[in-house]
Image (cartoon, rainbow, N blue to C red):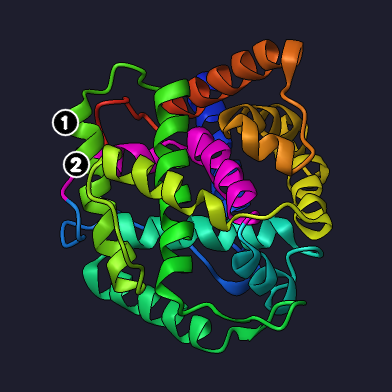
């Protein structure tokens, strides 16, 4: 009998541990299988960017930090989610939605979008100053989308493929726009330039608040169990380094400084290890 290959055994164990971290096995969740009937073709920009586990984790944390600066988005999270008690669960559900809508069969993507829209329809209330808010507000959904799109892509450019051509970056925004519109966002940028312009236009609606800083502190400092918790400080530092200086100031976050270098080294090394484990290449997608 042939002896098992220790390298292949280690690779398979690493893949299993990552899949366990991103799928709620208690609810019977399994990894999302890539489909030939997905909304986006294989090896297109959105499938390449969203395939990289580590850069998506960094970009996701950065996007959430930015989203909490909009008082409407912040209030919806505080009033209608258990984010404080189950931050990892919230991030895992978001990651699964991204996976289903990017790689899953169109029917599964449609079902996932319908579920999110149904949840949003129940999220409404008033801000402390009496201003009404709703998760179906097209402009707020646009803010959530543009922060995700910009931060997912920026994390990919920083940690995976700095030389990605601008034409491919613009195509990423055009592809991601399809999902944003299905969720009710408006306006929706279709190029990087449009995304940056929208980001600048909405900056005036952002507010610093104790609650936003509390959520930011949870994102940056709360540790999860297992191997993910061991690398989380490095990924959090990378996320904080990714957001604009004005956002760090509003959230009372300090730029990592000297810690930025080890954080980038660890983030890049972890990303490369997981791409090896999943047999991914930066120019290819599931």
Badge 2: few (under 14), some or many (20 or more) residues near its Cα, within 10 Å? Answer: some
State the SS at label 1: helix
Instruction: Return the residue at label 2.
Output: 171
Q: Camera-side residue: 98 or 284? A: 98
Q: Which residue is found at the position 70% from the left and 28% from the top?
A: 237
Q: Camera-side residue: 10 or 132? A: 132
The reply to whether residue 149 is in sight is: yes
- In percent of width and height, residue 258 lies at 75, 10
> Residue 52 occupies which quadrant of the picture?
top left
Badge 1: few (under 14), some or many (20 or more) residues near its Cα, within 10 Å? Answer: few
Q: Can you say which quadrant of the picture contains the C terminus?
A: top left
Disc marking residue 35: none
Q: Which residue is found at the position 37% from the left and 81% from the top?
A: 114
Instruction: Return the residue at label 1.
Output: 167
Left/right of residue 212 with respect to residue 116 in the rendered view: right
- In percent of width and height, residue 226 lies at 77, 42
- In percent of width and height, residue 170 lies at 22, 38
Q: Are marks 1 and 2 in contact (CB under 8 Å)?
A: yes
The reply to whether residue 3 is in sight is: no
Q: Which residue is found at the position 70% from the left and 39% from the top?
A: 228
State the SS at label 2: helix
- In percent of width and height, residue 165 lies at 21, 23
Chief secondary structure of the magenta span? helix
Label 1 vs label 2: CA separation? 6 Å
Left/right of residue 156 with respect to residue 229 in the rendered view: left
Q: Camera-side residue: 202 or 81? A: 202
Q: Which region is colored magenta?
A: 41-69
Q: Which residue is found at the position 67% from the left and 62% from the top?
A: 89
Image: 160 above or below 92: above
């Amino acid at each position: 009998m042939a002896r098992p290959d220790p390298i292949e055994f280690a690779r398979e164990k690493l893949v299993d541990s990552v899949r366990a971290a991103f799928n709620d096995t208690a609810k019977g969740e399994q990894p999302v299988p890539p489909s030939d009937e997905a909304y986006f073709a294989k090896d297109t920009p959105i499938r390449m960017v969203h395939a990289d586990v580590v850069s998506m984790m960094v970009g996701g944390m950065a996007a959430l930090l930015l989203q909490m600066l909009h008082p409407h988005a912040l209030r919806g999270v505080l009033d209608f989610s258990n984010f404080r008690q189950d931050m990892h669960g919230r991030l895992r559900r978001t990651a699964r939605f991204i996976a289903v809508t990017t790689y899953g069969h169109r029917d599964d993507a449609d079902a996932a979008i319908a579920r999110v829209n149904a949840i949003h329809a129940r999220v409404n209330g008033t801000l402390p100053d009496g201003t009404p808010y709703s998760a179906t507000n097209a402009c707020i959904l646009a803010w959530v989308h543009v922060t995700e799109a910009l931060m997912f892509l920026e994390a990919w450019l920083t940690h995976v493929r700095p030389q990605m051509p601008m034409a491919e970056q613009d195509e990423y925004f055009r592809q991601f726009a399809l999902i944003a519109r299905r969720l009710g966002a408006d306006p929706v940028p279709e190029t990087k330039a449009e995304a940056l312009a929208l980001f600048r236009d909405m900056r005036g609606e952002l507010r610093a608040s104790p609650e936003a800083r509390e959520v930011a502190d949870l994102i940056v400092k709360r540790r999860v169990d297992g191997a993910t918790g061991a690398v989380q400080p490095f990924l959090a530092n990378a996320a904080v380094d990714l957001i604009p200086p004005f956002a760090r100031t509003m959230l009372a976050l300090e730029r990592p400084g000297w810690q930025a270098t080890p954080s980038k080294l660890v983030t890049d090394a972890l990303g490369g290890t997981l791409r090896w484990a999943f047999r991914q290449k930066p120019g290819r997608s599931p």
